[in-house]
Image (cartoon, helix red, strand yellow):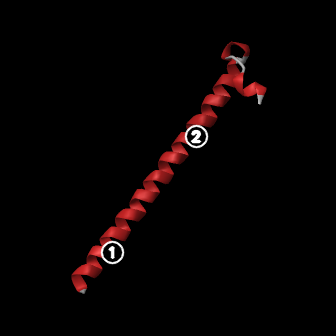
Amino acid sequence: MTDKYEPLCSATKEEIIEKYKEEFHLYIFDCWLLKQRKNAIIKIISQEEKYDEIF
């Protein structure tokens, strides 16, 4: 765990770029998951509204 708290000045340029890429990809994936969840919720709500109109 000690490497987690190393100052950035001790890291190489490649290490900093690699850490940035990894965090960016995780951020993009989180955004995609959030969008998928929102789309699923919207579909569920629209289906509920359709069933409410029928019954």
Q: How many marks?
A: 2
**Rendering coords of residue 13 (x, y %):** 68, 18
Question: What residue is at 24 percent from the left and 87 percent from the top?
Answer: 55
Looking at the image, residue 23 sits to the left or right of residue 43; the answer is: right
Viewer-proximal residue among 3 and 12: 3
Q: Amino acid at mark 2?
A: His
Label 1 sits on a secondary structure element that is: helix
Q: State which mark lies toward you, 1 or 2.
A: 1
**Rendering coords of residue 1 (x, y %):** 77, 31
Instruction: Relative to 53, say whether 14 is above or below.
Output: above
> Which residue is most to the right?
2
Residue that badge 2 annotates: 25
> Which residue is most to the bottom?
55
Residue that badge 1 annotates: 47
**Rendering coords of residue 44 (x, y %):** 37, 70
Instruction: Relative to 55, say whether 2 is above or below.
Output: above
Question: What residue is at 29 percent from the left and 81 percent from the top?
Answer: 51
> Which residue is most to the top?
9
